[in-house]
Image (cartoon, helix red, strand yellow):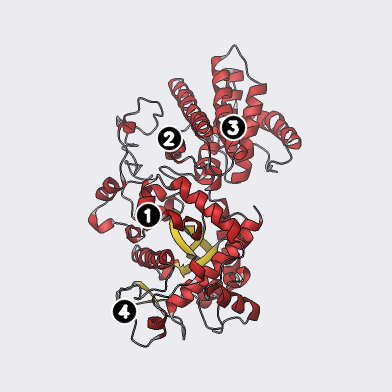
Amino acid sequence: MHGCKHKSEMDHCQHIVSGSSLNCQHIVSPVAEEYWQHVAHLPFYSKLELREEDWGSTVPITWHTDGVRIYKSQKAWVYSFAPAVRKGRSLDTKMLTLLFREHDMTKPGTHDDVGLFIAWCMEVLRSGLYPSTDMNGKPWPRQSREAKMAGKQFAGGWKCAFAAFKADLEARVLVHKLVRNWSSYSICEHCLASRKPGSPFTFGDFTENALYLEHFFTHSEFLILNPPDKQSSWVHVRGWDKDRNLDEPGPSRDMLHVVHQGVGQHAVASLISHHYEDLFRGSLTLGVLERLLQTDAWPHYKSWCRDHKEMASSSMPFNLPRFNRESWKSYPELGSCYKAACVKTFIFWCAAFLRENMDCKDPSSCLRADAAYSLAHFQHLQDLHGAWLTSDVAEAMSAAGRNFLILYQALACQSRHAGQHLYHIVPKFHCLLHLVLRLPIEKRNPAFDHLYQEEDYMKEIGKIASRTHARTMDTVTLLRSAVKLGAVPSESVWVMIFTVDDADRYVVLYAFDLMYVQVLVCTLLMALYLLLDKSFDAL
């Protein structure tokens, strides 16, 4: 396979790697400094051993992994990275790094090897120097190109350091081999919350009296909880700890999976269903409920959207199947036809709808309106502020989220005592609790760490990969994605090529005539340059 010949891009890459600085340095440095300044008090930062004078020249990097369906019977696993302070389109601000077909993988062996590989990459990028050994710790052969480049500075003093790991539930459990996860009785790796019936540590208690709040696991305790043979290989990535998994569970800041594809779906459907069921005081039939959803709730929603044109709207009318209310024994939940952006709109609309229809003499009606308002206020504060929050804003945001959880719990208890199937409490509500508890500590706006761009990027990679032949899908997809970004650094093949060794584990092969680490560093730095250049032009 021959690399693409883009003379200007190749010259541009060589110009960067030869030692010149980024032309957006005056924009990048202050933003990078701001990021490190705001996270310097967190436990993971001390592991980076990052000097304050290096903040302005060290770009925080987030890694993301997920599976994407390529063909009907083929799924690929994708690893990509991006600056943590990026802004812009996903294709312009992320770089595809590793891709392999699922049926060729060994689990968890492949993910373990990738973790070790990324650990080595981050050590190289953090040092700002070409390495003196390969990823296995072996010195380069004497007189080799690798040995000649060892210890020399690249990219004019620019460096990168680990900032976060992003993934959904499936990927996080696979990569980090978590024993405590959402599908087990012990659902949380950060506290003692349990979903075991009758447990005193029930995860559905969001009040101050919840027993699981008495102790939060440290990272060291978390590692002890996992058996020695089930430790994540990411322990070798300098700076990684459980609190830097910016995904669904724990101190997550991923509003996409936690709220817009989780809590919000249950809350909106339950609040609206309960509103109509309360109006009829037990005499409501499913047929009448469907008619009310179609002739009352849906017209009100469309009218509200016309008055708020900046919000994403849905064209899928409300009905019983889409509210999962075809039976009184099923808990209401919005269907998957309503995408995350639409669910976010539903949260605001639901608050307005229940406020307009609130009966001040009915405690249950007031409780529903207050719960909907608290969730909408929690979301509104995120939309209103920037990446970093003041102490007052962080406290207010945390209080709004906590109020919603407590009110939702009260509604769930009332419905349960009345024998109604409403207000289902699932583990994602516990994830939201950790999110709001961490807000005053980290003061990071959750809206700036969600996985919307990551999910969009996976969709784009899926489109690229689906237009390739199955036998060459991995390498061709890597190359084409780099061409789209404009990050092809050489005429030689630079893509990450994998094969299976005798132990049936993936190993990295060296690209043809170029030192692999040079190719890796050039690719990452070129991508980083383009990501920063495009990202910060939009600021």
Q: Residue 240 carries which label?
A: 1
Q: How crowded is mark 4: few (under 14 residues within 10 Å), some or many (20 or more)?
A: some
Q: Which of 314 and 390 is in front in this view?
A: 390
- Contact check, label 2 and label 3, Cβ < 8 Å: no
Residue 283 is marked as none
Measuring 56% from the left and 83% from the top, which residue is drawn there?
A: 491
Label 1: few (<14), some (14–19) or many (≥20) C-alpha neighbours in 10 Å: many
User: Label 2's element?
Assistant: helix
Of labels 4 and 1, earlier in sequence is 4
Determine which of the numbered discs, if any, sits on residue 139 in the image.
Answer: 4
Residue to which mark 3 is pinned? 376
Tell which circle, 2 or 3, labels the residue nearer the N-terminal end: 3
Per the model, the C-alpha gap separating discs 2 and 3 is 18 Å
Q: How far apart are the two marked residues, 4 and 2, measured between alpha carbons?
A: 47 Å
- Mark 1 and mark 3 lie on one chain; the one further toward the N terminus is 1
Determine the CA span between mark 1 and mark 3. Answer: 33 Å
Label 4 or label 2, whichever comes before in sequence order: 4
x and y, in percent, of residue 509 in the image? 41, 79
Q: Distance between the residues labelled 4 and 1?
A: 26 Å
Q: Which amino acid does label 2 sit on?
A: Leu
Q: Are discs 4 and 2 less than 8 Å apart at CB?
A: no
Quadrant location of residue 505? bottom left
In this orientation, does residue 446 appear? yes
State the residue position of label 2: 437
Tally of numbered discs: 4
Q: What element carries label 3?
A: helix
**What residue is rendered at 63% in x and 61% in y?**
534
Q: Single out the residue that lies furthest toward the top.
A: 361
Amino acid carrying mark 3 in the image: Ala
**In the rendered image, is residue 328 in sight?**
no
Q: Quadrant of residue 260?
A: top right
